[in-house]
Image (cartoon, rainbow, N blue to C red):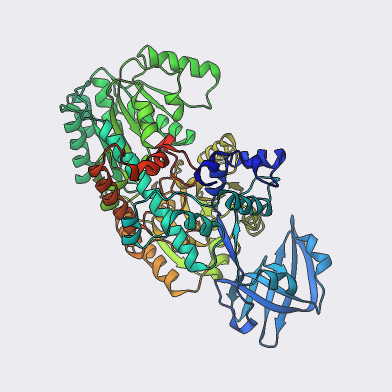
């Protein structure tokens, strides 16, 4: 049936009824094409079981063991614990299960099972927490296979997705290739249909990587082509809002208790040159965490206001928008800034407050509008919007910036990002923007003290967190996963929150935060943490952007080896924002030399750009189906660090294709042109580019 079948509704697949198709739709899967683009989040690789003496600490192991002696069951507050020893002729391993009462009936001394999970070494003995347990027959049927595991919603099973996927491939039969054959040959990339099939049902690790690499290249090529085509339609736009430097900004710079760094001044001069020039500004300020981008944004917004125009600042979260608003109000009052009249506009405002904010904006009473994507809603009308600032650029796409800029006529755009992407990649990935880099930190800041430790350090870390909280400070603890079972052997937020509650005094308030919570619930928790109502926040990487708590002095990152270096740096940037000494604890659960070497870089430097270059040199985190890099621009399989060579190749290929056929009108590019126009789950969502 080929490409024509991709638009068929998922309910046309054998075995997918009305109930199941509704569950698929909750995952964004409506058509067969959507389904084929619904990639596994990880894979189960069922290697042959090893002996107890051959296990590899810090890695996934399957080991055939017999339960020895008694099975101990106990409760610690709300946590039920089952513990026992299992062994063979070569050694023993201590097994522990938390909140797993359903196992009690199947655990009997003298019975033999295959235990599969992460092995840790504690002193002279080995341990496994929460290992999956299989009968020997069960495991034999899985041995040697890579089984896909998909993102799921309640009611949708992994088995249902797998069966639907198998049926889809049978019905489709084959798909047209859309990347020119000379490119595939030059880069040794497999064909598109084989790549799709292998990403879902890989025969082995090599075929899986071949498939991932091909589909990653596709993501980059389509992204760059779309960006280039967009830029070609945007001819140099005349500056409708020429501005001059105003005395208010000069006075503010003189009053500030610190001098701008050389890099800050260079960025500010770039902005002044842009907004006073003949063409509209389209600039990215790329600066490390804490490098002082916000004051540059304030100067730009103040300049627009003093020139008689409106400016808008769009933040990725309501909490960050509110923090910007309060910070601006404080500076306005402290330094008697006359021209800046800020207003806050977010989805959390009451209908009455929204209406009032919209009135102030439309009548020009407010000239500095701070908010989230509520700023681009249809009901929001600006009087004379001249400048748009987007905070955390990688969280917004080209189209979102355009939607806000489109609220004015030929509006200046200033984007800001704390994601330290090497300049060679930034030029490609932010191809529609001119780039200024702030690569210096303001003087007087206490550098964060770092340490990379093993799992045996946990009790010491808990005591350190306790001491910091009792001294009036706060702490973050980061886990890669939300709940048990998302990734074997990886610490999860749900269980870890309880573990911390059990290990810290009852007087210390421990709370949990993760991305599956409703936005209002997330914001409420972050606001409570900012108010110091929460002492220790256990979170996934959702806190990477969007919260500023100067009182937080400890960042502890579990399974640190699972993260990319740049993401670790982003997380570390949540502390070190106040006057107190801050600390970052990287907990390494792997005993491999590569992990130690990578994490040692974090131990030696707090410079985000050096770390980004190291990330580029080391080709990323290695486990691309684990925790994703920061600022990955919504690529599903591609990683800008791990696949830096493909990013560069895709940019050159896009330029070659468009130089020979700017309209993509030649027959050999017809499928490629259709692909660019199609929203697909496995590609960057071009609707929000």
In the figure, 302 relative to 435: above or below? above
- Horizontal arrangement in the rendering, residue 14 relative to residue 440 (left or right): right
How far across and down, in percent of the image, does residue 505 sit?
64, 55
* Residue 496 vs residue 141, the one in the foreground: 141
Q: Position of residue 75 (x, y in %)?
A: 77, 61
Q: Residue at x 64, y 59 (%)?
A: 503
Q: Position of residue 435 (x, y in %)?
A: 24, 42
Which residue is most to the top?
363
**Residue at the spot x=54%, y=39% of the render?**
7
Left or right: residue 203 compared with residue 178: right
| Residue visible at 50% across and 74% down in the picture | 591
Q: Residue furthest right?
A: 105
Q: Is residue 639 visible?
A: no
Give the quadrant of the C terminus. Answer: top left
Q: Is residue 608 visible?
A: yes
Q: Is residue 164 above or below residue 281?
A: below
In which quarter of the view is residue 148 placed?
bottom right
Figure label count? 0
Residue in the image at 44% along x and 74% along y: 593
Whether 570 is drawn above or below 66: the answer is above
Residue 510 percent coordinates (x, y): 61, 49
Q: Is residue 401 above or below residue 535?
A: above
Q: Residue furthest bottom?
A: 89
Q: Is residue 600 left or right of residue 114?
A: left
């Amino acid at each position: 049936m080929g490409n024509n079948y991709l638009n068929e509704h998922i309910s046309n697949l054998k075995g997918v009824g009305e109930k199941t198709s509704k569950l698929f739709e909750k995952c964004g899967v409506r058509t067969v094409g959507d389904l084929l683009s619904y990639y596994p989040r990880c894979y189960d690789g069922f290697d042959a079981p090893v002996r107890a003496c051959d296990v590899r600490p810090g890695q996934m192991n399957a080991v055939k063991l017999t339960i020895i002696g008694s099975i101990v069951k106990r409760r610690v507050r709300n946590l039920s614990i089952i513990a026992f020893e299992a062994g063979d002729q070569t050694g023993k391993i201590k097994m522990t299960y938390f909140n797993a009462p359903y196992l009690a009936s199947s655990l009997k001394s003298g019975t033999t099972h295959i235990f599969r999970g992460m092995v840790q070494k504690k002193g002279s003995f080995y341990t496994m927490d929460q290992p999956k347990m299989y009968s020997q027959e069960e495991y034999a049927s899985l041995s040697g296979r890579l089984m896909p595991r998909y993102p799921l919603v309640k009611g949708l099973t992994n088995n249902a997705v797998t069966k639907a996927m198998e049926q889809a491939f049978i019905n489709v039969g084959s798909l047209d290739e859309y990347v020119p054959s000379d490119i595939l040959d030059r880069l040794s990339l497999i064909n598109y249909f084989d790549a799709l099939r292998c990403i879902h049902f890989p025969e082995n690790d090599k075929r899986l990587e071949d498939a991932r690499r091909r589909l990653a290249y596709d993501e980059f090529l389509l992204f760059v082509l779309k960006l280039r085509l967009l830029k070609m339609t945007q001819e140099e736009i005349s500056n409708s809002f020429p501005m001059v430097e105003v005395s208010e900004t000069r006075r503010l710079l003189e009053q500030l208790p610190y001098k701008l760094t050389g890099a800050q001044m260079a960025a500010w001069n770039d902005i002044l040159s842009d907004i006073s020039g003949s063409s509209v500004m389209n600039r990215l300020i790329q600066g490390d965490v804490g490098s002082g981008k916000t004051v540059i944004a304030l100067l730009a917004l103040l300049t627009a206001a003093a020139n008689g125009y409106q400016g808008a600042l769009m933040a990725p979260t309501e909490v960050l928008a509110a923090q910007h608003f309060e910070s601006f109000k404080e500076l306005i009052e402290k330094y008697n800034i006359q021209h800046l009249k800020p207003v806050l506009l977010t989805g959390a405002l009451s209908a009455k407050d929204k209406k009032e904010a919209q009135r102030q904006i439309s009548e020009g009473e407010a000239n500095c509008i701070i908010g989230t994507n509520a700023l681009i809603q249809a009901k929001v009308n600006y009087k004379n919007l001249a400048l748009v600032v987007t905070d955390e650029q990688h969280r917004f796409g080209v189209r979102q910036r355009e939607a806000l800029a489109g609220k004015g006529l030929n509006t200046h755009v200033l984007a800001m990002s704390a994601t330290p992407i090497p300049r060679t990649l930034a030029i490609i990935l932010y191809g529609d923007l001119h780039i200024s880099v702030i690569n210096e930190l303001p003087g007087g800041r206490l550098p964060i003290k770092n340490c990379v430790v093993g799992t045996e350090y946990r009790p010491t870390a808990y005591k350190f967190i306790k001491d910091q909280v009792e001294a009036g400070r706060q702490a973050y603890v980061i886990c890669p996963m939300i709940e048990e079972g998302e990734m074997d052997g990886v610490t999860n937020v749900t269980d870890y929150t309880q573990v911390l509650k059990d290990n810290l005094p009852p007087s210390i308030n421990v709370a949990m935060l993760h991305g599956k919570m409703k936005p209002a619930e997330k914001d409420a928790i972050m606001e409570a943490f900012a108010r110091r109502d929460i002492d220790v926040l256990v979170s996934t990487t959702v806190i990477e952007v969007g919260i500023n708590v100067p009182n937080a002095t400890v960042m502890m990152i579990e399974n640190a080896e699972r993260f990319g270096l740049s993401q670790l740096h982003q997380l570390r940037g949540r502390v070190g924002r106040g006057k107190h000494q801050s600390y970052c604890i990287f907990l390494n659960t792997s005993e491999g030399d590569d992990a130690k070497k990578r994490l040692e870089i974090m131990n030696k430097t707090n410079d985000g750009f050096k770390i980004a270059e190291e990330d580029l040199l080391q080709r990323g985190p290695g486990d691309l189906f684990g925790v994703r890099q920061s600022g990955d621009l919504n690529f599903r399989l591609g990683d800008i660090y791990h696949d830096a060579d493909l990013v560069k190749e895709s940019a050159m290929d896009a330029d070659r294709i468009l130089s020979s056929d700017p309209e993509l009108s030649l027959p050999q590019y017809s499928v490629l042109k259709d692909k660019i126009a199609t929203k697909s789950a496995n590609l960057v969502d071009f609707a929000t580019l």
